[in-house]
Amino acid sequence: MRRLQVDPVTLDALREFGNIGAGHAATALSTLLGGRVKMSVTDARLCPFSEIVDVVGGGETIVAAVFIRIFGTISGNMFVLMSLPSADRLLERLLERLLPAPRKAQEYTELEQSAIAEVGNILSGAYVAAISDLCGISLNQSIPAVAIDMAAALLDIGLMMSGDEENQAILISTSLVHDGNNIDAYFFLLPDLDGTEVLLDILRGKIRHG
Amino acid sequence: MVEEKEQIRIGIAEGAILATPGTLMTAGLGSCVGLVIYDDSRLLAGMVHIMLPESPHGRPSHPQKYADTGIAWLYETLMEHGASHAHLRAKYAGGSQMFQALQMEALRIGERNVRAVSMQLERLRIPVLGADVGGNVGRTVWFELPSRHYLIRTARGDERQM
């Protein structure tokens, strides 16, 4: 199996990318949620496609997922995944009401799903902006699509559009703190075909040359 | 001696054959299809977890990933295990469209997977005795021998059998 090169420069580049994205996201989410939002990057690495489901607790774990397609110099798919407890904490802040927990996938209302989609949109938009900042390339993103279901079932569309299953995704794990609440969100970027390598080359070059 | 029942878990774009009492299972089917072909005259069944309708070239490294090469692999492997063509039957599930909001052609892959599976089975003249497809829900599925029951559980907690 062909593994992408993961050296200290690449890891630095990914962390830098994660931090810049988290910075953008914190600013946007502070406006949405009202009050200060602190975001920290808890993990920034490459993740083989086949192992993405393990990050969220296995293929059958029920998660909230936001799917966004990117177009431009690099095309690919982005997913923002949240556990249901994290999604509930987020919704309680956003909708300013207490929610009964735990709930089944089909018990999330349309309003709650749009709220999750909007936060996913902000997070992925922040990472798209980080790519533009770092690499000087502009990317467009589709409208967000949201679903709550088994992780493996939600992610298969991302795998099949990326061609080779031995390809790797860029994973940025973030922890968002607002008003004493911790909300964990996983951001995955799955470029089409050889996009991961192309993107890493650009990121590494930018970090090395300042 | 009591023979232990075999439990085979099939990952995405994989396939396996079961020729003893036991279970074939695959978890979290979204737009993918979990296809079982079995011989109703003996203890023999196989499952593939199909991701895409067509292979891009003749000999992919994972033939089970595509409806065309996956079904050919499953059919040939069952015949090598002594299946009789006249006794082959099929049951399958999956082919959902998980994200309803996006109308891109690429996201309608579930529907195309189901069409490709049904077409390949028709071409091989294998009767379909059960199909639980479409919708916008993930499915975890099992196929049991010797009962030949195909069981489906969704993220919403529904359970069905065919």
Image: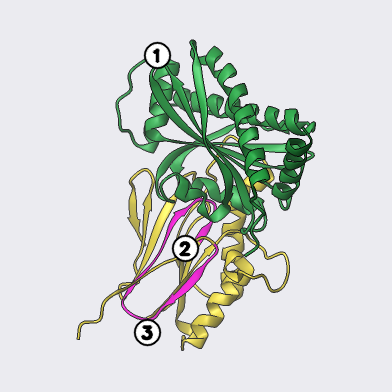
Chain colours: A green, B yellow
Residue closer to the observer: B126 or A192: A192
Magenta segment range?
B13-33
* Callout 2: SS: strand
Residue B92 marker = 2
Going 55% across and 45% down the picture, which residue do you hit? B97
- Distance, label 1 to label 2, CA atoms, is 44 Å
Q: Position of residue B36 (x, y in %)?
A: 46, 69
* Callout 3: SS: loop
* Residues marked 1 and 3, same chain: no
- Distance, label 1 to label 3, CA atoms, is 60 Å
Residue B121 marker = none
**Outermost residue to the top:** A35
> Left of A168 or right of it: where is A132?
right
> Left of A149 or right of it: where is B4?
left
Q: Tell me the kind of residue under disc 1.
A: Glu
Q: Chain of mark 2?
A: B
Let me know if residue B126 appears in the view.
Answer: yes
Residue B42 marker = 3
- Distance, label 2 to label 3, CA atoms, is 19 Å
Q: Position of residue A112 (x, y in %)?
A: 45, 25
Residue closer to the observer: A194 or B91: A194
Q: Tell me the kind of residue under disc 3.
A: Arg
* Callout 1: SS: loop
Q: Residue B61, located in which quarter of the rendered image? A: bottom right
Q: Position of residue B37 (x, y in %)?
A: 47, 73
Q: Position of residue B106 (x, y in %)?
A: 67, 47
Residue closer to the observer: B67 or A183: A183
Q: On the image, numbered disc 1 is attached to which residue?
A: A96
Going 36% across and 43% down the picture, which residue do you hit? B156
Q: Label 1: few (<14), some or many (≥20) within 10 Å?
A: few
- Residue A138, placed above or below residue A165: above
Q: Is residue A196 magenta?
A: no
